[in-house]
Amino acid sequence: MTQASEHNGGSEAPPGPSFQFSLKTLLVVTTSVAVGLSSLVAAPAVINLIAATCFLMLLPVVLTVVLVYGRGYQRTFCIGAMFPSGRRPRITHHIGPAIHLLLHG
């Protein structure tokens, strides 16, 4: 028994599955993003504003989760992306009028 396996109770964890690149996956992801973004372009401005606000509110949450649980380059990327994701001065100016427009027509 090796010294490393003695520290973790004698069982060694198998390495996790790595990402396997395939053209099919790339095509599916690209098509999904294109359809999603084109549906936002065709939507009314109020819906676009709500979608953008939700995205900007969830972005720091996702970055924080990956920052805590990620390793290596993922963690480094999230550290660098946290500052720009926290800056939202322009979108907050438009939320009030958009809600007013949504409620009062």
Image: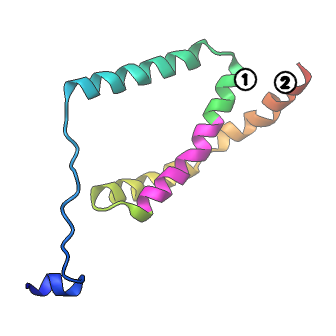
Q: Which mark is residue 94?
A: none
**Which percent across, then down, holds residue 54?**
63, 38
Please report the residue visible at 60 percent of the width from the left and 12 percent of the height from the top. Answer: 42
In-front residue for pair 77/8: 8
Amino acid type at circle 1 is: Val
In-front residue for pair 38/76: 38
In this rendering, would 16 be left or right of 90? left
Please report the residue visible at 47 percent of the width from the left and 58 percent of the height from the top. Answer: 65
* Residue 8 part of the magenta-drawn span: no
Of labels 1 and 2, earlier in sequence is 1
Q: Are marks 1 and 2 in contact (CB under 8 Å)?
A: yes
Q: Which mark is residue 101?
A: 2
Name the residue tied to disc 1. 46
| Image height of 49 relative to 55, above or below | above
Please report the residue visible at 62 percent of the width from the left and 45 percent of the height from the top. Answer: 57
Q: Looking at the figure, which quarter contains the N terminus?
A: bottom left
Amino acid type at circle 2 is: Leu
* Secondary structure found at label 2: helix
